Amino acid sequence: MARLIAVSNRVSPPTEAGVATAGGLAMALAAALRESSGIWFGWSGRTVETYTGQLSIDRVGGVTVATVDLDEQDRLEYYNGYANKTLWPLFHYRMDLAAYERSFDAGYVRVNERFADALVPLVEPDDILWVQDYHLLPLARELRQRGITNRLGFFLHIPWPARRVFTTLPRHEDLVSALLDYDLIGFQTQDDCDAFASYLTQSTNGVVTGSGLVSAFGKQSRIGAFPIGIDTVDFQHAASSPLALDAFKGMRRSMAGRKMILGVDRLDYSKGLEERFLAYEQVLADRPDLLEKVFLLQIATLSRDDVDAYQDLRARLDAVSGRINGAFATVEWVPIRYVNRSYRRDQLAGIYRAAQVGLVTPLRDGMNLVAKEYVAAQDPDNPGVLVLSEFAGAAAQLSAALIINPFSREDTAEAIRRALVMPKAERRSRWRDLMDGVARDTVEMWRDRFVGALQAASRADAAIPARG
Ligand code: ADQ
Protein backbone atom coordinates (compact mmCIF):
# COMPACT_ATOMS: atom_id res chain seq x y z
CA MET A 1 0.00 0.00 0.00
CA ALA A 2 1.25 3.50 -0.84
CA ARG A 3 1.94 5.77 2.12
CA LEU A 4 -1.17 7.65 3.18
CA ILE A 5 -1.11 11.26 4.34
CA ALA A 6 -4.35 12.29 6.04
CA VAL A 7 -5.05 16.00 6.26
CA SER A 8 -7.75 17.58 8.39
CA ASN A 9 -8.34 20.82 10.23
CA ARG A 10 -7.63 19.16 13.59
CA VAL A 11 -5.56 16.05 14.11
CA SER A 12 -6.83 13.51 16.60
CA PRO A 13 -5.34 10.01 16.61
CA PRO A 14 -6.54 8.15 19.68
CA THR A 15 -3.96 7.79 22.45
CA GLU A 16 -3.98 4.67 24.57
CA ALA A 17 -5.66 6.53 27.39
CA GLY A 18 -8.09 8.23 25.01
CA VAL A 19 -9.47 5.20 23.16
CA ALA A 20 -12.65 5.35 25.25
CA THR A 21 -13.48 8.82 23.97
CA ALA A 22 -12.15 8.59 20.40
CA GLY A 23 -14.65 8.53 17.54
CA GLY A 24 -14.78 5.81 14.89
CA LEU A 25 -13.41 8.10 12.19
CA ALA A 26 -10.25 8.88 14.20
CA MET A 27 -9.76 5.18 14.92
CA ALA A 28 -10.22 4.15 11.28
CA LEU A 29 -7.87 6.82 9.94
CA ALA A 30 -5.29 6.08 12.62
CA ALA A 31 -5.37 2.36 11.75
CA ALA A 32 -4.75 3.08 8.06
CA LEU A 33 -1.95 5.50 8.92
CA ARG A 34 -0.25 2.96 11.19
CA GLU A 35 -0.53 0.30 8.50
CA SER A 36 1.03 2.47 5.78
CA SER A 37 3.50 4.30 8.11
CA GLY A 38 1.63 7.43 7.13
CA ILE A 39 1.30 10.91 8.55
CA TRP A 40 -1.65 12.89 9.90
CA PHE A 41 -1.28 16.60 9.18
CA GLY A 42 -3.32 19.55 10.43
CA TRP A 43 -3.69 22.47 12.82
CA SER A 44 -2.43 21.91 16.36
CA GLY A 45 -5.42 23.84 17.74
CA ARG A 46 -2.99 26.37 19.26
CA THR A 47 -2.70 29.99 18.26
CA VAL A 48 0.55 31.97 18.43
CA GLU A 49 1.16 35.70 18.16
CA THR A 50 3.01 35.49 14.85
CA TYR A 51 2.65 32.64 12.38
CA THR A 52 5.98 30.87 11.75
CA GLY A 53 5.00 27.81 9.70
CA GLN A 54 7.11 25.73 12.06
CA LEU A 55 6.09 22.03 11.86
CA SER A 56 5.83 19.96 15.03
CA ILE A 57 6.27 16.24 14.46
CA ASP A 58 5.16 13.84 17.20
CA ARG A 59 4.13 10.21 17.63
CA VAL A 60 0.64 9.88 19.04
CA GLY A 61 -0.94 6.44 19.56
CA GLY A 62 1.52 4.89 17.07
CA VAL A 63 0.77 7.50 14.40
CA THR A 64 3.13 10.20 13.11
CA VAL A 65 1.42 13.52 13.57
CA ALA A 66 2.57 16.76 11.93
CA THR A 67 0.96 20.00 13.06
CA VAL A 68 1.31 23.75 12.62
CA ASP A 69 0.17 26.51 14.94
CA LEU A 70 -1.99 29.27 13.44
CA ASP A 71 -2.26 32.89 14.52
CA GLU A 72 -5.26 34.53 16.17
CA GLN A 73 -6.37 36.18 12.93
CA ASP A 74 -6.37 32.74 11.26
CA ARG A 75 -8.58 31.35 14.00
CA LEU A 76 -11.04 34.22 13.66
CA GLU A 77 -11.14 34.44 9.87
CA TYR A 78 -10.54 30.86 8.73
CA TYR A 79 -11.90 28.64 11.51
CA ASN A 80 -14.58 30.68 13.27
CA GLY A 81 -15.05 32.79 10.14
CA TYR A 82 -15.24 31.20 6.69
CA ALA A 83 -15.46 27.58 7.87
CA ASN A 84 -17.98 27.94 10.68
CA LYS A 85 -19.81 31.20 9.92
CA THR A 86 -19.96 30.95 6.13
CA LEU A 87 -19.66 27.39 4.81
CA TRP A 88 -21.19 25.45 7.71
CA PRO A 89 -24.48 27.39 7.81
CA LEU A 90 -24.73 27.64 4.03
CA PHE A 91 -24.08 23.94 3.44
CA HIS A 92 -26.77 23.22 6.06
CA TYR A 93 -29.24 25.47 4.21
CA ARG A 94 -29.05 28.29 6.77
CA MET A 95 -28.48 31.18 4.39
CA ASP A 96 -29.96 33.42 7.09
CA LEU A 97 -26.97 32.65 9.32
CA ALA A 98 -24.24 32.66 6.66
CA ALA A 99 -21.81 35.59 6.93
CA TYR A 100 -20.20 36.76 3.70
CA GLU A 101 -17.21 38.80 4.81
CA ARG A 102 -14.25 39.31 2.55
CA SER A 103 -11.81 39.03 5.44
CA PHE A 104 -13.15 35.51 6.14
CA ASP A 105 -12.65 34.58 2.51
CA ALA A 106 -9.08 35.91 2.57
CA GLY A 107 -8.33 34.17 5.86
CA TYR A 108 -9.62 30.86 4.48
CA VAL A 109 -7.40 31.07 1.40
CA ARG A 110 -4.44 32.19 3.54
CA VAL A 111 -4.69 29.19 5.88
CA ASN A 112 -5.06 26.78 2.96
CA GLU A 113 -1.87 28.33 1.52
CA ARG A 114 -0.15 27.97 4.87
CA PHE A 115 -1.21 24.33 5.14
CA ALA A 116 0.13 23.67 1.63
CA ASP A 117 3.47 25.39 2.40
CA ALA A 118 3.89 23.34 5.57
CA LEU A 119 2.75 20.08 3.98
CA VAL A 120 4.77 20.09 0.73
CA PRO A 121 8.15 19.20 2.33
CA LEU A 122 6.57 16.08 3.86
CA VAL A 123 5.21 14.67 0.59
CA GLU A 124 7.11 11.93 -1.22
CA PRO A 125 6.44 10.94 -4.85
CA ASP A 126 4.26 7.85 -4.24
CA ASP A 127 2.23 9.17 -1.31
CA ILE A 128 -1.50 9.50 -1.60
CA LEU A 129 -3.16 12.37 0.25
CA TRP A 130 -6.63 12.25 1.73
CA VAL A 131 -8.04 15.61 2.80
CA GLN A 132 -11.05 15.81 5.12
CA ASP A 133 -13.89 18.27 5.11
CA TYR A 134 -15.06 21.77 4.37
CA HIS A 135 -12.18 23.61 6.03
CA LEU A 136 -9.89 22.51 3.21
CA LEU A 137 -11.90 22.63 -0.02
CA PRO A 138 -9.18 24.59 -1.91
CA LEU A 139 -6.12 22.80 -0.50
CA ALA A 140 -5.60 20.72 -3.67
CA ARG A 141 -5.22 23.85 -5.78
CA GLU A 142 -2.55 25.18 -3.42
CA LEU A 143 -0.71 21.87 -3.49
CA ARG A 144 -0.84 21.63 -7.29
CA GLN A 145 0.47 25.19 -7.57
CA ARG A 146 3.43 24.06 -5.47
CA GLY A 147 4.19 21.22 -7.87
CA ILE A 148 2.48 18.32 -6.10
CA THR A 149 1.34 15.73 -8.68
CA ASN A 150 0.38 12.98 -6.21
CA ARG A 151 -3.09 11.42 -5.96
CA LEU A 152 -5.25 13.84 -3.97
CA GLY A 153 -8.61 12.82 -2.52
CA PHE A 154 -11.18 14.88 -0.65
CA PHE A 155 -14.12 13.79 1.48
CA LEU A 156 -16.92 16.15 2.48
CA HIS A 157 -18.51 15.16 5.80
CA ILE A 158 -21.36 17.66 5.53
CA PRO A 159 -24.07 17.96 2.84
CA TRP A 160 -23.42 19.54 -0.55
CA PRO A 161 -26.30 22.02 -0.88
CA ALA A 162 -28.75 22.42 -3.74
CA ARG A 163 -27.45 24.51 -6.63
CA ARG A 164 -29.54 27.61 -5.89
CA VAL A 165 -28.43 27.58 -2.27
CA PHE A 166 -24.78 27.11 -3.15
CA THR A 167 -24.80 29.90 -5.72
CA THR A 168 -25.63 32.43 -2.99
CA LEU A 169 -21.98 32.05 -1.97
CA PRO A 170 -19.92 34.88 -3.46
CA ARG A 171 -17.14 33.57 -5.73
CA HIS A 172 -18.59 30.05 -5.69
CA GLU A 173 -16.97 29.31 -9.07
CA ASP A 174 -13.53 29.88 -7.63
CA LEU A 175 -14.15 27.47 -4.77
CA VAL A 176 -15.40 24.70 -7.06
CA SER A 177 -12.65 25.26 -9.59
CA ALA A 178 -10.12 24.80 -6.76
CA LEU A 179 -11.96 21.69 -5.56
CA LEU A 180 -11.59 20.08 -8.99
CA ASP A 181 -7.83 19.89 -8.45
CA TYR A 182 -8.55 16.80 -6.35
CA ASP A 183 -8.55 13.50 -8.25
CA LEU A 184 -11.49 12.17 -6.27
CA ILE A 185 -14.21 14.09 -4.43
CA GLY A 186 -16.29 11.97 -2.06
CA PHE A 187 -19.72 12.83 -0.68
CA GLN A 188 -21.85 11.17 1.98
CA THR A 189 -24.85 10.41 -0.23
CA GLN A 190 -25.93 10.13 -3.84
CA ASP A 191 -28.11 13.20 -3.25
CA ASP A 192 -25.02 15.26 -2.41
CA CYS A 193 -23.27 13.91 -5.49
CA ASP A 194 -26.27 14.80 -7.64
CA ALA A 195 -26.41 18.33 -6.19
CA PHE A 196 -22.74 18.84 -7.02
CA ALA A 197 -23.20 17.41 -10.52
CA SER A 198 -26.21 19.65 -11.06
CA TYR A 199 -24.12 22.69 -10.11
CA LEU A 200 -21.41 21.68 -12.59
CA THR A 201 -23.76 21.05 -15.49
CA GLN A 202 -26.20 23.91 -14.89
CA SER A 203 -24.11 26.70 -13.41
CA THR A 204 -20.90 26.06 -15.34
CA ASN A 205 -20.09 24.47 -18.69
CA GLY A 206 -19.32 21.23 -16.92
CA VAL A 207 -19.82 17.68 -18.12
CA VAL A 208 -20.67 14.77 -15.84
CA THR A 209 -20.75 11.14 -16.97
CA GLY A 210 -22.75 8.32 -15.41
CA SER A 211 -19.59 6.76 -14.02
CA GLY A 212 -18.72 9.84 -12.00
CA LEU A 213 -16.16 11.50 -14.25
CA VAL A 214 -16.59 15.25 -14.15
CA SER A 215 -15.01 18.07 -16.07
CA ALA A 216 -15.39 21.81 -15.66
CA PHE A 217 -13.19 24.92 -15.49
CA GLY A 218 -10.76 23.08 -17.79
CA LYS A 219 -10.12 20.40 -15.16
CA GLN A 220 -11.14 16.77 -14.71
CA SER A 221 -11.95 14.85 -11.58
CA ARG A 222 -14.15 12.07 -10.23
CA ILE A 223 -17.02 12.17 -7.81
CA GLY A 224 -18.70 9.44 -5.79
CA ALA A 225 -20.90 8.69 -2.78
CA PHE A 226 -19.06 7.07 0.13
CA PRO A 227 -21.46 6.91 3.08
CA ILE A 228 -19.54 6.86 6.36
CA GLY A 229 -20.33 4.28 9.04
CA ILE A 230 -19.26 3.46 12.58
CA ASP A 231 -16.76 0.95 13.98
CA THR A 232 -19.67 -1.40 14.53
CA VAL A 233 -17.90 -4.33 16.16
CA ASP A 234 -15.92 -2.10 18.55
CA PHE A 235 -19.04 -0.17 19.39
CA GLN A 236 -20.95 -3.34 20.17
CA HIS A 237 -18.08 -4.42 22.41
CA ALA A 238 -18.21 -1.05 24.12
CA ALA A 239 -21.94 -1.55 24.61
CA SER A 240 -21.37 -4.77 26.55
CA SER A 241 -18.38 -3.53 28.61
CA PRO A 242 -18.64 -3.19 32.41
CA LEU A 243 -18.85 0.61 32.19
CA ALA A 244 -21.66 0.42 29.64
CA LEU A 245 -23.47 -2.03 31.88
CA ASP A 246 -23.08 0.33 34.85
CA ALA A 247 -24.40 3.23 32.78
CA PHE A 248 -27.30 1.07 31.57
CA LYS A 249 -28.24 -0.07 35.05
CA GLY A 250 -27.89 3.42 36.52
CA MET A 251 -30.09 4.78 33.78
CA ARG A 252 -32.76 2.11 34.22
CA ARG A 253 -32.79 2.77 37.99
CA SER A 254 -33.30 6.47 37.48
CA MET A 255 -36.02 5.81 34.89
CA ALA A 256 -38.12 4.22 37.64
CA GLY A 257 -40.28 2.32 35.14
CA ARG A 258 -40.74 5.32 32.83
CA LYS A 259 -39.92 5.17 29.12
CA MET A 260 -36.95 7.18 27.94
CA ILE A 261 -36.73 9.09 24.68
CA LEU A 262 -33.10 9.95 23.97
CA GLY A 263 -31.33 12.62 21.92
CA VAL A 264 -27.51 12.86 21.69
CA ASP A 265 -26.03 15.66 19.62
CA ARG A 266 -23.45 18.39 19.44
CA LEU A 267 -25.29 21.58 20.34
CA ASP A 268 -25.70 22.81 16.77
CA TYR A 269 -28.56 24.52 14.92
CA SER A 270 -28.40 21.88 12.18
CA LYS A 271 -29.48 19.19 14.65
CA GLY A 272 -33.08 20.42 15.03
CA LEU A 273 -33.00 20.50 18.83
CA GLU A 274 -35.51 23.26 19.33
CA GLU A 275 -37.96 21.64 16.89
CA ARG A 276 -37.45 18.34 18.76
CA PHE A 277 -38.31 19.92 22.12
CA LEU A 278 -41.44 21.47 20.61
CA ALA A 279 -42.55 18.17 19.06
CA TYR A 280 -42.11 16.47 22.42
CA GLU A 281 -44.10 19.24 24.08
CA GLN A 282 -46.86 18.52 21.58
CA VAL A 283 -46.84 14.84 22.59
CA LEU A 284 -47.28 15.84 26.24
CA ALA A 285 -50.00 18.35 25.44
CA ASP A 286 -51.98 15.88 23.29
CA ARG A 287 -51.59 12.85 25.52
CA PRO A 288 -52.12 13.63 29.23
CA ASP A 289 -52.01 9.85 29.88
CA LEU A 290 -48.28 9.93 29.06
CA LEU A 291 -47.46 12.55 31.71
CA GLU A 292 -45.09 11.08 34.31
CA LYS A 293 -44.77 7.93 32.15
CA VAL A 294 -42.08 9.15 29.74
CA PHE A 295 -39.22 11.61 29.70
CA LEU A 296 -36.82 13.04 27.17
CA LEU A 297 -33.09 12.87 27.95
CA GLN A 298 -31.30 15.31 25.68
CA ILE A 299 -27.51 15.19 25.85
CA ALA A 300 -26.20 18.19 23.90
CA THR A 301 -22.46 18.76 24.12
CA LEU A 302 -21.44 22.38 23.75
CA SER A 303 -19.59 23.16 20.54
CA ARG A 304 -18.25 26.32 18.82
CA ASP A 305 -19.38 28.23 21.86
CA ASP A 306 -17.51 31.36 20.80
CA VAL A 307 -19.72 31.78 17.69
CA ASP A 308 -22.80 34.00 18.24
CA ALA A 309 -25.30 31.70 16.54
CA TYR A 310 -24.33 28.90 18.94
CA GLN A 311 -24.68 31.13 21.99
CA ASP A 312 -28.12 32.24 20.76
CA LEU A 313 -29.19 28.65 20.22
CA ARG A 314 -27.97 27.65 23.66
CA ALA A 315 -29.98 30.45 25.26
CA ARG A 316 -33.09 29.43 23.28
CA LEU A 317 -32.76 25.78 24.26
CA ASP A 318 -32.32 26.73 27.92
CA ALA A 319 -35.48 28.81 27.65
CA VAL A 320 -37.62 26.26 25.77
CA SER A 321 -36.63 23.31 27.96
CA GLY A 322 -37.19 25.47 31.06
CA ARG A 323 -40.60 26.53 29.82
CA ILE A 324 -41.70 22.96 29.02
CA ASN A 325 -40.43 21.70 32.37
CA GLY A 326 -42.14 24.58 34.17
CA ALA A 327 -45.43 23.82 32.44
CA PHE A 328 -45.52 20.02 32.85
CA ALA A 329 -43.20 18.96 35.70
CA THR A 330 -44.53 17.57 38.97
CA VAL A 331 -42.66 17.21 42.23
CA GLU A 332 -41.73 13.67 41.19
CA TRP A 333 -41.12 14.03 37.47
CA VAL A 334 -39.24 16.29 35.07
CA PRO A 335 -40.28 15.90 31.41
CA ILE A 336 -36.93 16.99 29.89
CA ARG A 337 -33.56 16.14 31.35
CA TYR A 338 -31.26 18.47 29.48
CA VAL A 339 -27.54 17.82 29.87
CA ASN A 340 -24.68 19.78 28.28
CA ARG A 341 -21.76 17.51 29.13
CA SER A 342 -20.19 14.79 27.01
CA TYR A 343 -19.77 11.10 27.82
CA ARG A 344 -17.30 8.32 27.14
CA ARG A 345 -18.29 6.02 24.28
CA ASP A 346 -18.95 3.04 26.54
CA GLN A 347 -21.15 5.08 28.90
CA LEU A 348 -22.97 6.50 25.92
CA ALA A 349 -23.53 2.99 24.55
CA GLY A 350 -25.13 1.96 27.87
CA ILE A 351 -27.39 5.02 27.80
CA TYR A 352 -28.43 4.30 24.18
CA ARG A 353 -29.34 0.76 25.18
CA ALA A 354 -31.54 1.95 28.02
CA ALA A 355 -33.62 4.22 25.75
CA GLN A 356 -36.89 2.95 24.25
CA VAL A 357 -36.77 5.68 21.60
CA GLY A 358 -33.73 7.18 19.83
CA LEU A 359 -34.68 10.58 18.48
CA VAL A 360 -32.39 11.78 15.69
CA THR A 361 -34.08 14.72 14.00
CA PRO A 362 -31.55 17.02 12.31
CA LEU A 363 -32.83 19.63 9.86
CA ARG A 364 -29.78 18.79 7.71
CA ASP A 365 -26.94 16.40 8.42
CA GLY A 366 -24.21 14.95 6.22
CA MET A 367 -24.70 11.48 7.70
CA ASN A 368 -25.36 11.41 11.50
CA LEU A 369 -23.47 8.69 13.30
CA VAL A 370 -25.58 8.88 16.46
CA ALA A 371 -28.37 7.11 14.54
CA LYS A 372 -26.02 4.23 13.71
CA GLU A 373 -24.58 4.07 17.22
CA TYR A 374 -28.08 3.92 18.68
CA VAL A 375 -28.90 0.92 16.48
CA ALA A 376 -25.63 -0.89 17.26
CA ALA A 377 -26.13 -0.50 21.03
CA GLN A 378 -29.59 -2.10 21.20
CA ASP A 379 -30.50 -5.39 22.81
CA PRO A 380 -31.50 -7.60 19.83
CA ASP A 381 -34.26 -9.26 21.87
CA ASN A 382 -35.82 -6.04 23.04
CA PRO A 383 -34.56 -3.18 20.85
CA GLY A 384 -35.63 0.44 21.00
CA VAL A 385 -37.09 2.36 18.06
CA LEU A 386 -35.12 4.83 15.95
CA VAL A 387 -36.97 7.97 14.84
CA LEU A 388 -34.89 9.53 12.08
CA SER A 389 -35.07 12.71 10.03
CA GLU A 390 -35.37 12.30 6.29
CA PHE A 391 -32.75 15.09 6.02
CA ALA A 392 -29.96 13.09 7.67
CA GLY A 393 -27.71 11.34 5.16
CA ALA A 394 -28.23 8.21 7.27
CA ALA A 395 -31.90 8.06 6.20
CA ALA A 396 -30.82 6.77 2.77
CA GLN A 397 -29.48 3.64 4.47
CA LEU A 398 -31.65 3.32 7.59
CA SER A 399 -35.02 3.19 5.88
CA ALA A 400 -36.43 0.77 8.50
CA ALA A 401 -36.41 3.61 11.05
CA LEU A 402 -39.52 5.73 11.56
CA ILE A 403 -38.58 8.40 9.03
CA ILE A 404 -39.95 11.86 9.80
CA ASN A 405 -39.91 15.39 8.48
CA PRO A 406 -38.42 17.40 11.38
CA PHE A 407 -39.95 20.63 10.06
CA SER A 408 -43.36 19.15 10.86
CA ARG A 409 -44.02 19.17 14.60
CA GLU A 410 -47.00 16.90 14.13
CA ASP A 411 -45.11 14.39 12.03
CA THR A 412 -42.39 14.13 14.68
CA ALA A 413 -44.87 13.98 17.56
CA GLU A 414 -46.83 11.24 15.80
CA ALA A 415 -43.67 9.15 15.29
CA ILE A 416 -42.71 9.54 18.97
CA ARG A 417 -46.14 8.32 20.03
CA ARG A 418 -45.93 5.41 17.62
CA ALA A 419 -42.44 4.46 18.78
CA LEU A 420 -43.52 4.45 22.43
CA VAL A 421 -46.15 1.75 21.83
CA MET A 422 -44.59 -0.24 18.99
CA PRO A 423 -45.06 -4.01 19.55
CA LYS A 424 -41.94 -6.02 20.21
CA ALA A 425 -42.23 -8.07 17.00
CA GLU A 426 -42.21 -4.93 14.85
CA ARG A 427 -39.33 -3.43 16.85
CA ARG A 428 -37.27 -6.56 16.34
CA SER A 429 -37.95 -6.83 12.66
CA ARG A 430 -37.15 -3.14 12.04
CA TRP A 431 -34.02 -3.40 14.17
CA ARG A 432 -32.75 -6.44 12.23
CA ASP A 433 -33.04 -4.48 8.97
CA LEU A 434 -31.30 -1.48 10.49
CA MET A 435 -28.55 -3.57 12.04
CA ASP A 436 -27.82 -5.34 8.74
CA GLY A 437 -26.94 -1.97 7.22
CA VAL A 438 -24.94 -0.74 10.22
CA ALA A 439 -22.95 -4.00 10.31
CA ARG A 440 -22.29 -3.91 6.56
CA ASP A 441 -21.37 -0.26 5.95
CA THR A 442 -18.76 0.30 8.64
CA VAL A 443 -16.22 3.09 8.93
CA GLU A 444 -13.45 0.70 7.88
CA MET A 445 -15.43 -0.16 4.77
CA TRP A 446 -15.88 3.56 4.04
CA ARG A 447 -12.14 4.18 4.41
CA ASP A 448 -11.15 1.22 2.24
CA ARG A 449 -13.67 2.06 -0.48
CA PHE A 450 -12.47 5.66 -0.63
CA VAL A 451 -8.76 4.88 -0.56
CA GLY A 452 -9.28 2.08 -3.12
CA ALA A 453 -11.15 4.43 -5.46
CA LEU A 454 -8.47 7.11 -5.00
CA GLN A 455 -5.72 4.66 -5.83
CA ALA A 456 -7.62 3.52 -8.90
CA ALA A 457 -8.37 7.07 -10.10
CA SER A 458 -5.72 8.08 -12.57
CA ARG A 459 -5.57 11.67 -13.69
CA ALA A 460 -5.09 10.58 -17.30
CA ASP A 461 -8.25 8.49 -17.60
CA ALA A 462 -10.31 11.27 -16.07
CA ALA A 463 -9.87 13.13 -19.35
CA ILE A 464 -13.32 13.71 -20.81
CA PRO A 465 -14.38 16.45 -23.15
CA ALA A 466 -15.51 19.82 -21.81
CA ARG A 467 -18.84 21.06 -23.15
CA GLY A 468 -18.45 23.78 -25.74
P1 ADQ B 1 -21.13 15.76 13.65
O1 ADQ B 1 -21.97 16.90 13.23
O2 ADQ B 1 -20.28 16.00 14.83
O3 ADQ B 1 -20.23 15.20 12.46
P2 ADQ B 1 -22.40 13.03 14.15
O4 ADQ B 1 -22.30 12.23 12.93
O5 ADQ B 1 -23.70 12.87 14.83
O6 ADQ B 1 -22.23 14.60 13.96
O7 ADQ B 1 -21.23 12.56 15.10
C1 ADQ B 1 -21.21 12.90 16.40
C2 ADQ B 1 -20.26 11.98 17.16
O8 ADQ B 1 -20.03 12.63 18.39
C3 ADQ B 1 -20.87 10.62 17.43
O9 ADQ B 1 -19.89 9.63 17.37
C4 ADQ B 1 -21.39 10.78 18.86
O10 ADQ B 1 -21.33 9.62 19.65
C5 ADQ B 1 -20.46 11.81 19.44
N1 ADQ B 1 -21.20 12.61 20.45
C6 ADQ B 1 -22.22 13.48 20.24
N2 ADQ B 1 -22.65 13.98 21.41
C7 ADQ B 1 -21.90 13.41 22.37
C8 ADQ B 1 -21.86 13.51 23.79
N3 ADQ B 1 -22.70 14.31 24.47
N4 ADQ B 1 -20.93 12.78 24.45
C9 ADQ B 1 -20.07 12.00 23.77
N5 ADQ B 1 -20.07 11.86 22.45
C10 ADQ B 1 -20.97 12.56 21.75
C11 ADQ B 1 -20.00 15.50 11.08
C12 ADQ B 1 -21.24 15.65 10.20
C13 ADQ B 1 -22.10 14.40 10.30
C14 ADQ B 1 -21.28 13.17 9.92
C15 ADQ B 1 -19.97 13.13 10.70
C16 ADQ B 1 -19.04 12.03 10.18
O11 ADQ B 1 -21.99 16.80 10.59
O12 ADQ B 1 -23.23 14.49 9.46
O13 ADQ B 1 -22.02 11.99 10.22
O14 ADQ B 1 -19.27 14.36 10.57
O15 ADQ B 1 -18.85 12.12 8.82
Image: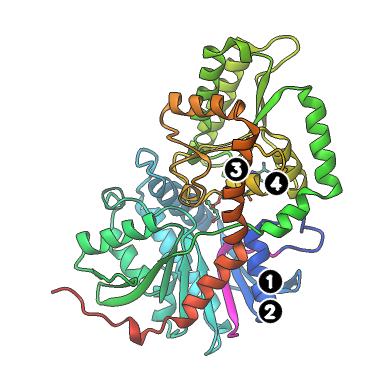
Q: Which residues are magenta?
A: 1-13
Please name whichever residue, 276 or 233, is drawn nearer the observer in this view of the structure.
233
- For marks 3 and 4, give the CA distance: 16 Å
Within 10 Å of the Cα at label 3, are there few (<14), some (14-19), or many (20+) other Cα atoms? Answer: some
Give the residue type at disc 4: Ala
Near-viewer residue (22 or 191): 191
**Cα–Cα gap, marks 1 and 4:** 23 Å
In the rendered image, which residue does mark 3 sit on?
A: 429
Q: Which amino acid type corresponds to the residue marked 3 in the rendered image? A: Ser
- Closest to the camera, between mark 1 and mark 4, is 4
Q: Is residue 170 above or below residue 380?
A: below
In the image, residue 267 sits, relative to residue 52, either above or below, namely above
Q: Position of residue 196 (x, y in %)?
A: 32, 60
Query: Circle 4 sits in a helix, a strand or a loop, which is it?
Result: loop
- Give the secondary structure at mark 2: helix
Identify the residue position indicated by label 4 in the image.
377
Which mark lies nearer to you, 3 or 4? 3
Q: State the image coordinates of residue 211 (x, y, percent, origin top left).
A: 33, 72
**Label 3 lies in ligand 1 vicinity (Cβ under 8 Å):** no
> Do tag 1 and tag 2 residues touch (Cβ < 8 Å)?
yes
